[in-house]
Image (cartoon, rainbow, N blue to C red):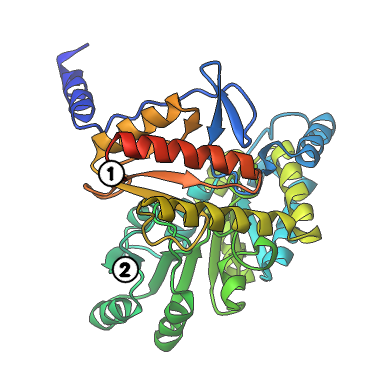
């Protein structure tokens, strides 16, 4: 290794010494309640596959048929020759599902944020961003060149104070928040944020990546959950979590969607989502529109698991959703806890800095509608055993 790169080895060693080095597991099975990792069957407690759709027969069949008709690759960006009729139908169906005027799909939820924020604000503008927003929001804000003002987490009063102090000095303003915060599982106070946005005539954007398929009637998301249709200008989401596939969504005012078709850089400069993915997403929409059964099962499983974890003595933080953080504090303990769980047949990864603040390391458990009572029982038994062994619970 050249001298110019020697610092990388030093930094990697620092991560290892601090318990912050991420050992990435390799999976050799479909996503589901159980996985095969290193030849071992393990209970899956850390996928975002909320509704168990990632390997659902109807989604698999839809993807197969799309490959037979359209092939495997998109061939181009959407604006040249990469748009097919499945993309258009998916966007129409998603707008209808979300109760919005229009929708546009992207390669991922991350790229949806990178496309949307810089297209709406620039160097003469200001963004009011929740302090705990996702990395994709943070990166989108940075790319925009706008002034970034972070307000205290889930605090509409702090947002209003920041607007009073800064908004008048800039051309345009944007408020942006996660809907469900992915590390803690708490929900943004969207009605109060919408009221502040209305009062000061500022665009409001919510990233509902962990609310799609989870909150609202049949998984229609946080705007539906709070009955705020028409009061939130931009909803960003993803189809890689509850929808079980891959891709990003931006839904909202038709003028915003039309502008993103013209100026959303990932839409303009990165190849389209494959036909197979679009077809599988359409199948997911079909399932969600047909029944609330999967969403209901997800919430039933989550309520049971959380209540039992609290009964055992674990700290599950402030979560209001199926995301269940098991708060452990220091990263080395969280990593050791994860390794011990794996030995007990439970796959649940440790999360530490910089994903969460120092001293806030945790195991984040992601409950799914695909888990049955036996699965949840096995997971609880493993957490109890490891928690007692490591002195986390008595």
Mark sitting on residue 263: none
Q: Quadrant of residue 57?
A: top right
Compared to 356, does 195 lie above or below? below
Alpha-carbon span between mark 2 and mark 1: 30 Å
Q: Which quarter of the rendered picture does the C terminus lie within?
A: top left
- Count neighbours of disc 2 (C-alpha within 10 A) and say few if under 14, some if 14 to 19, many if 20 or more: some
Mark sitting on residue 124: 2
Mark 2 vs mark 1: in front: 1
CB of mark 2 within 8 Å of CB of mark 1?
A: no
Dot 2 falls on a residue whose secondary structure is: loop
Image point (54%, 73%), residue name: 233
Q: Tell me if I can see residue 198 in this picture.
A: yes
Q: Quadrant of residue 14?
A: top left
Q: Position of residue 120 (x, y in %)?
A: 46, 65
Residue under numbered circle 1: 354
Q: Which quarter of the rendered picture does the N terminus lie within?
A: top left
The foreground one among 178 and 394 is: 394
Image point (64%, 47%), residue name: 79
Earlier-in-chain disc, 2 versus 1: 2
Q: Horizontal placement of 339 versus 304: left or right?
A: left
Q: Position of residue 259 (x, y in %)?
A: 57, 63
Dot 1 falls on a residue whose secondary structure is: loop
The foreground one among 245 and 79 is: 245
The foreground one among 361 and 131 is: 361
Compared to 165, does 100 lie above or below? above
Q: Tell me if I can see residue 136 in this picture.
A: no
Image point (31%, 31%), residue name: 336
- Count neighbours of disc 1 (C-alpha within 10 A) and say few if under 14, some if 14 to 19, many if 20 or more: few
């Amino acid at each position: 290794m050249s001298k110019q790169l020697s610092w990388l080895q030093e930094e990697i060693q620092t991560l290892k010494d601090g318990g912050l080095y991420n050992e990435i597991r390799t999976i050799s099975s479909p996503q589901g309640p159980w996985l095969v990792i290193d030849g071992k069957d393990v209970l899956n407690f850390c996928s975002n596959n909320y509704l168990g759709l990632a390997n659902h027969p109807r989604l698999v069949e839809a993807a197969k048929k799309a490959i037979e008709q359209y092939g495997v690759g998109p061939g181009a960006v959407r604006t040249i020759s990469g748009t097919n009729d499945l993309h258009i139908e998916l966007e129409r169906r998603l707008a209808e599902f979300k109760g919005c005027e229009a929708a546009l799909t992207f390669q991922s939820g991350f790229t949806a944020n990178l496309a949307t924020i810089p297209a709406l604000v620039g160097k003469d503008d200001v963004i009011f961003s929740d302090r705990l927003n996702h990395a994709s929001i943070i990166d989108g804000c940075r790319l925009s060149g706008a002034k970034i003002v972070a307000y205290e987490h889930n605090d509409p009063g702090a947002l209003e104070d920041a607007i009073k102090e800064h908004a008048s000095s800039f051309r345009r303003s944007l408020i942006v928040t996660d809907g469900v915060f992915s590390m803690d599982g708490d929900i943004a106070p969207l009605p109060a944020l919408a009221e502040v946005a209305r009062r000061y005539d500022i665009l409001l954007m919510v990233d509902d990546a962990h609310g799609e398929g989870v909150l609202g009637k049949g998984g229609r998301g946080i705007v539906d959950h709070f009955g705020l249709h028409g009061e939130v200008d931009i909803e960003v989401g993803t189809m890689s979590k509850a929808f079980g596939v891959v891709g990003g969504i931006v839904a909202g005012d038709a003028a915003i969607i039309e502008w993103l078709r013209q100026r959303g850089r990932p839409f303009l400069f990165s190849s389209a989502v494959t036909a197979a993915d679009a077809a599988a997403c359409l199948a997911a929409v079909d399932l969600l529109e047909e029944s609330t059964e999967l969403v209901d099962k997800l919430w039933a499983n989550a309520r049971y698991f959380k209540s039992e974890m609290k009964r055992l003595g674990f700290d599950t933080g402030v979560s209001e959703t199926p995301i269940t953080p098991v708060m452990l504090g220091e990263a080395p303990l969280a990593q050791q806890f994860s390794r011990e769980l794996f030995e007990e047949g439970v796959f649940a990864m440790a999360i530490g800095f910089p994903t969460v603040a120092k001293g806030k390391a945790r195991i984040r458990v992601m409950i799914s509608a695909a888990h049955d009572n036996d699965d949840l029982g096995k997971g609880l038994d493993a957490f109890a055993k490891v928690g007692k062994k490591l002195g986390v619970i008595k």
